[in-house]
Amino acid sequence: MPLLDAHGYRADPWRRIAAGEPATGDAVLVALADLPAVIAGRSNAQRIGVEVANTVRLPDLSAFLGQLDLVAIAFPAFNDGRAFSLARQLREAGFKGAVRAVGPVIADQFTHLVACGFDEVEVPDAIAARQPEAQWRGALASYGATYQTGYGAGASILERRRALRAGQGAAS
Amino acid sequence: MYRYDQFDEAFVRERVAQFRGQVARRIDGALTEDEFKPLRLKNGVYLQLHAYMLRIAIPYGTLSSVQLRQLALIGERYDRGYGHFTTRQNLQFNWPKLRDIPDILDLLADVGMHCIQTSGNCIRNTTADHFSGAAADEVEDPRPTAELIRQWSTMHPEFDYLPRKFKIAVTGAARDRAAIRAHDIGIQVVRHPVSGEVGYRLFVGGGLGRTPMIGKLVRDFLPKAHLLAYLQSLMRVYNLEGRRDNKYKARVKILVHEIGIEEFRARVEAEFAALDPAAIAADPDEVARIEAYFAAPAFATFPADSQRVVADRARDAAFDRWVETNTFPHRQPGYAAVTVSLKPVGGVPGDATSDQMRAVADLADAHSFGEIRVSHHQNLILPHVRQDELHALWTGLVAAGLAEANAGLITDIIACPGLDYCALATARSIPIAQAISRRFGSAERQREIGELGIKISGCINACGHHHVGHIGILGLEKSGQESYQVTLGGDATENAAIGQLLGPGITAEEVPDAIERLVGVYLAHRHDGETFAEAVRRLGIEPFKAGFLAPQPAEAAHAAA
């Protein structure tokens, strides 16, 4: 499935490892059940990612976060919003690796996904065909600022107001 | 009143542009109908039985006269010259064309309004007591809190694809006029019994629909500065754990019911403990900025009771009746809060023509500091009227056909749009309301019966809040026929209760007689000064059940004699 981040569609360096298949390669994406064994047998500099359902909870992942370079969370449907909270929890727990949304999310959700801590999305071919790169970039550009502090990289509206007040205070 | 600053303004303009783009992308096929639907709903656009419906957010039911005039203009230009005020303090237009909707959104943005999150599985318009800032019994005006929640909940990245819709209501008084325990989250501003600090009491898991539940206490006291972090924690638990396998079991009330309030509370508190409230909260300057918009208007000092009103009432019986029913005690001596009834006898509950909206806007400018409220009873409120000016106001309302003296009485009926408009409805609501209203239309009769709230829903989704009506009426379809179930003993206030079913369904034609029999039981048994609701609490449902089931009370009385 096509992979996309804030810069557009790009090649996917990650190799999905099926159950029982040897986890060889520079960057391997495995199921949660296989994760302890793959970490134990990790080769030097090998990057390991885990792919989980959106019903997985943070405590199921906590022990592994320091070992992981990628957490891929499934979206069974674009309007099943559980992964938004799970991604936020990963970020609040200090996870610094990449977080990926896997499934039929749409360009209109891209801002929310990024604000909740996702870096990239892996969408079905049909969606990529209907929603070319420009629509995803356009979605990101459609929000100047949002009200929620701590979501996304830019300053929230509340923080911008504070900055404006500080500026006015200094000017007066 | 809150006014948009440059950031609010830019945000809403961006949303209009975004929706324009989404409509275009739906048309060119970039978005499928399934993908477009939640985007359209989040912008207030419903596909109804006969046409699109547009639902406009009126945050915590507060409107300026300028905004109300703009709604009148939109009603005239893009609808059929009227609008419909809803039980969630919003306004619906029933006949807009889809291609006009982005233009309507621009007109709304011109006056600091929008349709964002008036539908869809997200946090909906935050509602509040319609007498906020006017009522004498408030700990604090709840609207700054509601405005803070409005901003925080607007396009929240984490909570825009919830299992189901989510409704929040806020009251600043112990006397609950905002039906907070019928909401997903109900917030009451309280004073801490020991420290005196002002904070919040929170209820969760209230809601009507097909599984009616009264909200349960989740937090007895929450410091004000912790509100957004606590809401974030609660919403996160719901977003992660709420059921998504069955839309009828997806509201937070089902989650609370299934895991129990103790377990739910524990999960919220665990989430809350991991957050830094200060990083999420609005800073004190921002809170102060919002509060300043809700400062009391420039009230003058008057005696508590206007001699002018006493004289006007003495010489004008119709005015006297209207003052008795449609005014509410104001915290400022010499002022009153006024209910402008949108329930003319035999009319459609909640409808107002564009001319009527303009009349109310003008009267608000003349007599109420330009401010109007929408109540969840589907009436309008002029919150700050000088008592000396009540007669002049009333005269203006009479001219506009808006002076029905029935606030809180049996003809002040709440009804959903029902089968006349709604795609979900199983039966008509409006004609039932009209028939009851005509039956009890006599001014003397209504006053004799006193306070009595009838609420009517045209399907099990309960938009007419029938479960919490003193008398509730639910329209269903039974083998091709409309069938109405009648419940008794519901209550939407601090004594919140779900009504109990009186018996088998009846036909539309039988409804007025059935209500007549219930009123008859009340009048026969009431103590001095006892309201209908109080009598039901004292007597229990049985005598009413007997009255409801007896098709001919006159005959029954005759046989017993």
Image: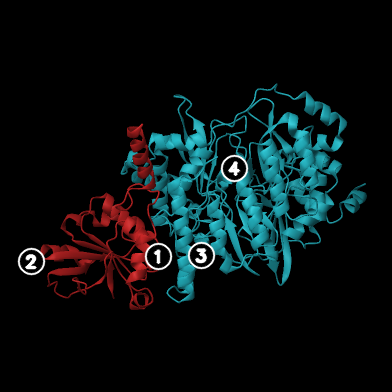
Chain colours: A red, B cyan
**Relative to B541, is B35 on the left or the right?**
left
Q: Marks 1 and 3: same chain?
A: no
Q: Nearer the viewer, mark 3 or mark 2?
A: 3
Q: Nearer the viewer, mark 2 or mark 1?
A: 1
Give the quarter of the figure containing the C terminus of chain A: top left
Disc 3, SS = helix
Label at residue B178: 4
Q: Nearer the viewer, mark 2 or mark 4?
A: 4
Give the quarter of the figure containing the N terminus of chain A: bottom left
Marked residue chain, label 3:
B
**Relative to B10, is B515 on the left or the right?**
right
Label at residue B278: none
Q: CA distance from mark 1 to mark 3?
A: 12 Å
Q: Marks 2 and 4: same chain?
A: no
**Are the residues at dot 4 and dot 1 in contact (C-beta closer than 8 Å)?**
no
Image point 34% across, 36% down: which residue? A166
**Residue identifier under label 1:** A108
Where does residue B22 sit, x and y in percent of width and height? 46, 67
Q: Nearer the viewer, mark 4 or mark 3?
A: 3
**Depth check: B316 or B347 in front?**
B316
**Residue identifier under label 3:** B40
Q: Marks 4 and 1: same chain?
A: no
Image point 34% across, 34% down: which residue? A171
Disc 2, SS = loop
Amino acid at the residue labelled 1 = Asp
